[in-house]
Amino acid sequence: MAELSDLTDADFEALDRGDIRSMSDAGLDILDALESQSNQANLTSSINAAVQENLNPSYAPGSAPMITNEDPVVGEANFAGQGFKDAIRRQKIGLGQTLNEGLGMFGLDTDKLPRAQDARDLRDETRKYDLTPSQYPGYKTGSMTGSAATAAPMLLATKNPAALGIGAGLGFTQPTLEENDLATRGINAAIYGGSALLGNMAGQGINAGMRGLLNPRIQPGAAELTEQGVQLTPGQFRGGLPKTMEDLATSIPFLGDKISDARIGSIEGFNLATLNNALTPINKKVTKIGNEGFDDAHVYIGEVYDEAYKSLPVVKVEAASGQELADSFFGIQGGIIKKGSLKDYNRTMQKEFYDQFNLNNSSGIPGRAWGDVQKNLRDRGFKILKTDQELGQALIDTSAAMNEMAARTSGEFGTLLKSANAAHRNMRGVRNATASAGTNEGVFMPSQLLRGIKKSDGSPDKLSFARGNMPLQSFAQDGQRLLPSKMPDSGTAQRQSTQSLLAGTGLGVGGSATIGAPATAALVGGLLGARNLYRPGAMNVINKARNRPDWIRAAGEGFNLPPGLSAAGGTGLLGGNFSSDPLLRDGGVY
């Protein structure tokens, strides 16, 4: 073949003149070859342009053209609905095929019922949805929803065994590509049964989780205590095993002292809440506890009494009101059985009441003087209760009758007196509890408060206490149920064990165990996280988080996802996706 190097000077001169005929034979051959290559290049370029224009491919110049399908028009086809229909159709084919194969065992199979060929036809029809799933958005979701819908019998499954059984039956009736393929049916039964069981168990877990979230389990009385400002530790709030574990943790160095401090704080909060609950009728609050808090509370009550009697100019004992007072006195006197007590009562009344007032004075009795006498009788009655319950109760009742008499004289006085008397009654049990807690400077335990309330019950056979009607009794019972029976002691031993632990010399258990510095650091790091749960701020957050409004608690208590619904969902999500026959999963081909 001639090459360009074969061209002579005469050939180049002939080309410059345009005189092709004057070129040599070799030059003419070379010229013909160049023209042929140019024509082929133009033809290839035209073909590529036509392909690109007609097929709209992803095409890079210089590379071979790539032919792709145009995206389908999404929106005109309801792919989700089609997937749902195909799932229903698949189940119909499966049920019919199962029945037909069963009849075939007796020679009764019929072409009127589906066969394996129908399953293969379904596979061929739905192949495209799996080959290009992005072109059919929603089909997969619709198919899974349809699978769940075909599991409607699961709604009857309220227990795990039932869900397993019904799910297995549903799996067994799935279509197969071959006739009488019992192996595939058995595998499908296991997969669908397991899916239904997992779905049912998941539903139970969701129910338990939502109920726990909306209506967390707390000890009875915990909400009542925390609403009054008593901060409970996590174990006290939860009770049961957490409480037991927390009790054991009090002996762990570096953690136990923090738990004990938190429990001491809960006792102190209980004392403050008790005093302020007692003062609720007069709308007062104290900030101290123990003996100081008790004294402050009585000062507040005394101030209300003083204000009440200052607002009462005179008490007039006349007509019907005077008769009512006399009837009350005679009734109290007649209720005293012991002769000695009756004698002392008459003597006291003569000295403290009749000798002080001229009941026939038309201008009445000064309100302040009346108040002083009823106060003396009431205080004397409380004091005598310890040695002579009949006499003490009689004097207290007499004081109450005087207050009722005065209340009929002045409406303003009656309002103030009622609130002061209510606060005073509340403080009777608190007074007994404070007195019994002398070693703790008047800081009492819930059990001491409960005994003090019982002691203050002057009803026959402590009937009011037995019925649970005494002031603050319910609050004290909540405290006794949740709080320690004795004052916790963080103690020197705890601090010494902590120091030993930090020094890496021991765990504080018998003083014999030793660990190295790295292990000590890791252990202390873990304990630090636990300690943080018992800081006041953290405990406050935990307490508030567990105190749900009543309407949220009611929603949590009533939350119930039907077990069969979750089982059906499990079948739709898992059964169809993990079918043993990959050609029939969710109506698609894998």
Image (cartoon, rainbow, N blue to C red):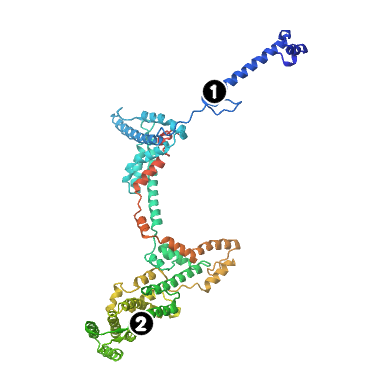
* Residue 423 image offset from top left, x and y in percent: 36, 76
* Residue 359 image offset from top left, x and y in percent: 26, 88
* Residue 455 image offset from top left, x and y in percent: 34, 79
Residue receiving disc 2: 310
Residue at 35 percent across and 53 percent down: it is: 559
Front residue of 292/497: it is 292
Residue at 28 percent across and 78 percent down: it is: 459
The residue furthest right is 9
> In the rendered image, which quarter is residue 212 located in?
bottom left
Query: In the shown orientation, is residue 53 left or right of residue 174?
Result: right
Front residue of 572/505: it is 572
Mark 1 is on which residue type?
A: Val
Which labelled disc corresponds to residue 51? 1
The residue furthest front is 363
Q: In the picture, which quadrant includes the N terminus? A: top right
Query: In the shown orientation, is residue 587 left or right of residue 466?
Result: right
* Residue 165 image offset from top left, x and y in percent: 34, 44
* N-term-proximal mark, 1 vs 2: 1
Front residue of 85/203: it is 85
